[in-house]
Image (cartoon, helix red, strand yellow):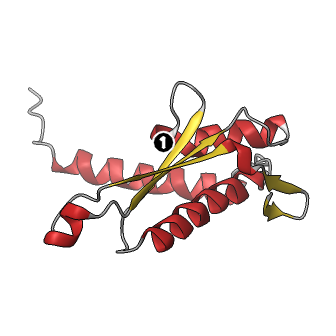
Amino acid sequence: MIPVTPSLALDERDLEERFIRAAGPGGQNVNKVSTAVELRFNVNGYTEMPDDVRARLERLAGRRLTLDGEIVIRADAHRTQDRNRSEALARLVALVEQATHRPKPRKPTKVPKAQKQKRLEHKAKRGSIKANRARPRHED
């Protein structure tokens, strides 16, 4: 079990690691060694998490969530498998931890009466300035 919060831990059976070659420049090392890691986490697997946390996690995952319900995290910033593996796991734990925070409900507030009055006065003043720019009308 991988602890995320005191009440939530990720089950290791839901994790799958695959090592692949990293893209980009790096010379002979990048062409020979598979140091990049692709970490897959099954959202609907063995890990017990509340439905609201699961829904927020799926929304936060965005494009990283597959149609099969797996979150795919790829890490290839470091030269070693071990560091890339720990970075990918840390990013997954941070994502799940972020999903555990329940957003505070928004309380609708009214615009103060003085603020409305100030806006209407400014609007009237701007309107009169623009009206004075117009050509004078000829009355016969």
Q: Quadrant of residue 68?
A: top right
Instruction: Compare residues 59 and 105 and report the one nearer the observer.
Output: 59
- How many tags in the picture? 1
Which part of the image, by quadrant, shows the C terminus?
A: top left
Number of other residues with Cα within 10 Å of mark 1, as a class: few under 14, some 14 to 19, many 20 or more: some
Q: Indicate whether 76 appears above or below 74.
A: below
The residue at the point 64 percent across, 62 percent down is 94
Which part of the image, by quadrant, shows the N terminus?
A: bottom right
- Left/right of residue 7 with respect to residue 51 in the rendered view: right
Q: Is residue 26 visible?
A: no
Q: Is residue 58 visible?
A: yes
Amino acid type of the residue that numbered disc 1 sits on in the rendered structure:
Arg
- Left/right of residue 78 with respect to residue 97 in the rendered view: left
Farthest residue, direction front: 32
The residue at the point 71 percent across, 51 percent down is 99
Which residue lies under the disc numbered 1?
64
Instruction: Compare residues 54 and 136 and report the one nearer the observer.
Output: 54
- Left/right of residue 119 with respect to residue 13 in the rendered view: left
Instruction: Compare residues 49 and 83 and report the one nearer the observer.
Output: 83
Q: Position of residue 131 (x, y in %)?
A: 25, 45
The residue at the point 36 percent across, 69 percent down is 77
Q: Position of residue 113 (x, y in %)?
A: 71, 53
Q: Position of residue 39 (x, y in %)?
A: 52, 51
Q: Quadrant of residue 35?
A: bottom left
The residue at the point 22 percent across, 71 percent down is 29
Q: Position of residue 135 (x, y in %)?
A: 10, 42
Could you tell me which secondary element the residue under label 1 belongs to? helix
- Left/right of residue 66 with respect to residue 11 in the rendered view: left
